[in-house]
Amino acid sequence: MYKTAFAASAALLLAACSGSQPDKAVFEKAINQYSAAQGVCMPLVLDVENSLLTGAAVVGDPLVKIAERDSEGRKINESALKQMRLLDKEGFYKQARAETVPSPENGREIKVQVYELTDKGKAQARPGPDGARFCIGSLKVEKINWFTEPTPADGVTVSKVSYEARLETAKWAEQFMREGGSNWQHPDATRTLVATMVKTNDGWRDIRELR
């Protein structure tokens, strides 16, 4: 009976420590955790007319303004407005009070729709060298190719991990691309990447997560 109880306790202890044992499943989980938090982010610039009047419409900016009509009263920017309504529905933006501005061509009042970035939207936005970027998904590990034997280096234990990753695009992002008239096709190709993993008191972590 005591032997059985000891064996069961040992099994539970090993299970509890399994997160620190280097194997493909442990590394896959750690890399996916980092990738999900980091996201794949890109510039999303809406194709709009009258941008000189309203400014560029960049997803991730605090305010996005889009004119509904041109100086002759014709409807414009219907695709861009559909895209913004989608972002409103997803909670990334909220529609604010519309503005009216005079056309520089003939003085006609033009109605401009205004959208404000929400806290949820701010969490998706990233600063970029040429303006805001917006996260549309994340890389997910498809396969761990190999990993090196964990080795001490500069006071920590590290392992190099080679893996195949595929972009998982959020459903709203794919619809966003289609609403904009883009011939969007989900990329099926995987990429071969290498990560440096560090052993911590909380299991293995991607070194980029610790910087």
Image (tube, rainbow, N blue to C red):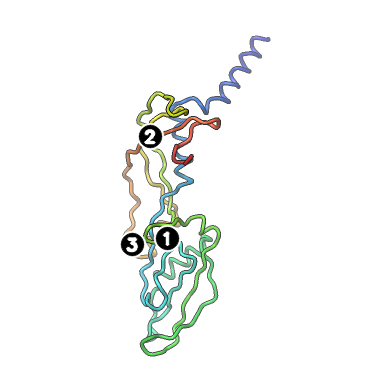
Mark closer to the chain start, 3 or 1:
1
The image position of residue 198, as x and y in percent, is 46, 32
| Residue 83 or residue 147, whichever sits in front | 147
Q: Which residue is mark 3?
A: 182
Looking at the image, residue 9 sits to the left or right of residue 141; the answer is right
| Residue type marked 3 | Ser
| Residue 103 or residue 24, whichever sits in front | 103
Quadrant of residue 75 within the rendered picture: bottom left
Label 1 neighbourhood size at 10 Å, few (<14), some (14-19), many (20+)? some
**Measured along the vertical axis of the image, is residue 128 above or below residue 34?**
below
Q: Which residue is mark 2?
A: 143
Looking at the image, residue 206 sits to the left or right of residue 14; the answer is left
Instruction: Check disc 2 and report its element: helix, strand or loop.
Output: strand
The image position of residue 69, as x and y in percent, is 41, 81
The image position of residue 159, as x and y in percent, is 41, 29
Instruction: Check disc 1 and report its element: helix, strand or loop.
Output: strand
Instruction: Check disc 3 and report its element: helix, strand or loop.
Output: loop
| Residue type marked 1 | Ala
Q: Which residue is mark 1?
A: 132
Mark closer to the chain start, 2 or 3:
2
Q: Residue at x 33, y 62 (%)?
A: 182
The label nearer to you, 1 versus 2, is 1
**Measured along the vertical axis of the image, is residue 61 above or below residue 186?**
below
Q: Gap in Å between the C-alphas at discs 2 and 3? A: 30 Å
Mark closer to the chain start, 1 or 2:
1
Q: Residue at x 41, y 89 (%)?
A: 107
Quadrant of residue 31 within the rendered picture: top left
Looking at the image, residue 48 sits to the left or right of residue 29; the answer is left
The image position of residue 60, as x and y in percent, is 46, 61
